Amino acid sequence: MVAAAELTVLFGALIVALGLIFLPNSKKAVGAFIGAVLVIAGAGFGGLAWAGIPGFIDLDPVVVPDADSLWEATILTSSDTDRTEAAETLSADSHTISYTLTDANMDGLGDLNLDVRVTNKNIGPSDKPWAFSASLVSVTSVAAANYIVNRTGVGGLGERFDVSYTLTESGAPTLSQTGETATSGDWFTGASDQLNVDFAMSVTGCQSITTTLPGKIVFMVGGISMTVDLLE
């Protein structure tokens, strides 16, 4: 739309110039008037972007979210595994959760489902969007190339750890995942949502966890480091 407005401005200016040069004197005023109307209309709606002059009416508003900055993220006690834990401990800052399982339960661990409460603490208007991201940082390999989280897309271009991110509350913010990272461009000031982070665990990898060799997963939520410790 802006490009069309600029073309209107240029076309109007061209009419003015050509009219002054080629039209007879009796019609020069008419040509100049028509050209001037087109210039004013085009500039009013779209502005002269190439000259750095904005239009009066923005027909194509594009809201670009600011970079993520200040977030609050805490792991919730509703987080769980698909096995019975001998103990579950949440750190004082709720950034680290530790699961202690018996050898039998650790060997059969297949799913780790984490709930994380995320709140946008940035300051700004309530309709201001902020960029948000959640990403996997590291996964313990308790034996040579034997990771405790499954690999998915093995042998293909999409090979990665099997982690998925889902926002559980309806409406904005929304989330888009690519590989091991999820991003949002419509997380507004003050908004809060529950982020579910689901890890498909490798039975073979978890069988290698011992009392002296624990498992660890580290991931980032809004720039905050979160950790899962698996103890036997």
Image: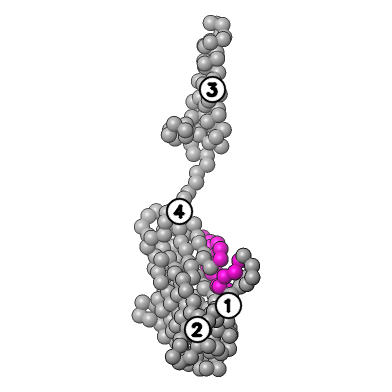
Which of these two is toward me, 174 or 100? 100
Q: Position of residue 80 (x, y in %)?
A: 51, 82
The residue at which mark 1 appears reads as 150
> Furthest-top residue in view?
25
> What kind of residue is marked 2?
Val
State the CA–CA distance, disc 2 to disc 1: 13 Å
Q: Dot 2 lies on which element?
A: strand
> What kind of residue is marked 4?
Pro
Q: Position of residue 145 (x, y in %)?
A: 54, 79
The residue at which mark 2 appears reads as 142
State the CA–CA distance, disc 3 to disc 2: 72 Å
State the CA–CA distance, disc 1 to disc 3: 63 Å
Answer yes or no: is residue 75 visible.
no
Tell me which numbered mark, 3 or 2, is placed earlier along the sequence. Answer: 3
Q: Are marks 4 and 2 in contact (CB under 8 Å)?
A: no
Q: Position of residue 139 (x, y in %)?
A: 49, 76
Tell me which numbered mark, 4 or 3, is placed earlier along the sequence. Answer: 3
At horizontal 53% and vertical 88% (from top left) the residue drawn is 208
At horizontal 49% and vertical 57% (from top left) the residue drawn is 185
Q: Dot 3 lies on which element?
A: helix
Q: Are marks 1 and 4 in contact (CB under 8 Å)?
A: no
Viewer-nearest of labels 1 and 3? 1
Q: Dot 1 lies on which element?
A: loop
Which mark, by number, is residue 12?
A: 3
Which mark, by number, is residue 65?
A: 4
Answer yes or no: is residue 54 visible.
yes
Check disc 3: other Cα within 10 Å, few if <14, some if 14-19, many if 20+. Answer: many
First to last magenta residue range: 158-179
Viewer-nearest of labels 1 and 4? 1
Check disc 2: other Cα within 10 Å, few if <14, some if 14-19, many if 20+. Answer: some
Q: Position of residue 216 (x, y in %)?
A: 46, 80
